[in-house]
Amino acid sequence: MAGQIPDLNATARAGTGKGAARQARREGLVPGVVYGGGTDPQPINIKYNELLKRLKAGRFLSTLFNLKVEGQDDVRVICRGVQRDVVKDLPTHVDLMRLHRTSRVNLFIPVEFTGQENCKGLRRGGVLTVVRNEVELRVTAGDIPEVLQVDITEHDIGDVIHMSEITLPEGARSVITGRDFVIGNISAPSSLKSADDEAEEAEAEAESLAAAEAADEAAEEE
């Protein structure tokens, strides 16, 4: 089921048009509009610093937010566009779309590797290498998973962990189709790798020495 959806705080903007938008920017706010969901568009303002922080964190355009406007019911929204200053590249306007519980959206969901304390490979000294710590899914707004779990208990050193090992929520699917991509692997510890490398070098040196001795013996027989 849906996990913790981050809040996005805003205030209702009484005026519309360029004049009201410029006034909002002078007050350290970014003007925006919320549309869709069978309701009239709602002009809003978002604090500039808060919006900039969200943008720098990444995934702003693919994150579902719980929009909180004082005096109004909370509503789930997803960003559908951020206009920026052509010179400074700073946000000047934001467009948010309301979502019904049955709306389908693309979101990045975190991946959690469970069973690490009993994992065969890790208990033998292996190291878990996370290739993807999140996966983009197409999900319904009312059934967004908080996290995707994959159990690595039975995995050993050298095993590769694939997307197919994750049980997706009903109705959800990966945006990447046509291949079972890698999300992690369990590699040998560096100490074991060094020992293996030394053994391989010693074996190669012994083979080289044996070849040289054989060549010398052949030369003496001639």
Image (cartoon, grey):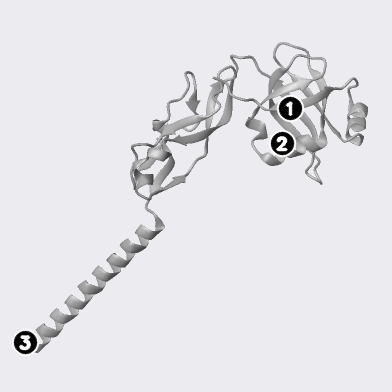
Residue on which the image places disc 1: 8
The residue under label 1 is which amino acid type? Answer: Leu
The residue under label 3 is which amino acid type? Answer: Glu
Task: Name the spot of residue 120 as percent of width and height, x first.
Answer: 34, 42
Which secondary structure, mark 3?
helix
> Looking at the image, is mark 2 or mark 1 earlier in the sequence?
1
Task: Name the spot of residue 68 as percent of width and height, x first.
Answer: 76, 21
Q: Is residue 18 above or below residue 156?
A: above
> Looking at the image, is mark 3 or mark 2 earlier in the sequence?
2
Instruction: Compute the Cα span from label 2 to label 1.
Output: 9 Å
Which secondary structure, mark 2?
helix
Q: Which mark is residue 54?
A: 2
Task: Tell me if mark 2 has few (under 14), some (14-19) or many (20+) residues whose alpha carbon lies within 10 angstroms of its own.
Answer: few
Q: Answer yes or no: do the residues labelled 2 and 1 have beta carbons within 8 Å?
A: yes
Q: Which mark is residue 221?
A: 3
Task: Name the spot of residue 115 as percent of width and height, x first.
Answer: 41, 35
The C terminus, quarter of image: bottom left
Image position of 39 (left or right of 5): right
Instruction: Compute the Cα span from label 3 to label 2.
Output: 80 Å
Image position of 193 (left or right of 210): right
Instruction: Compute the Cα span from label 3 to label 1.
Output: 88 Å
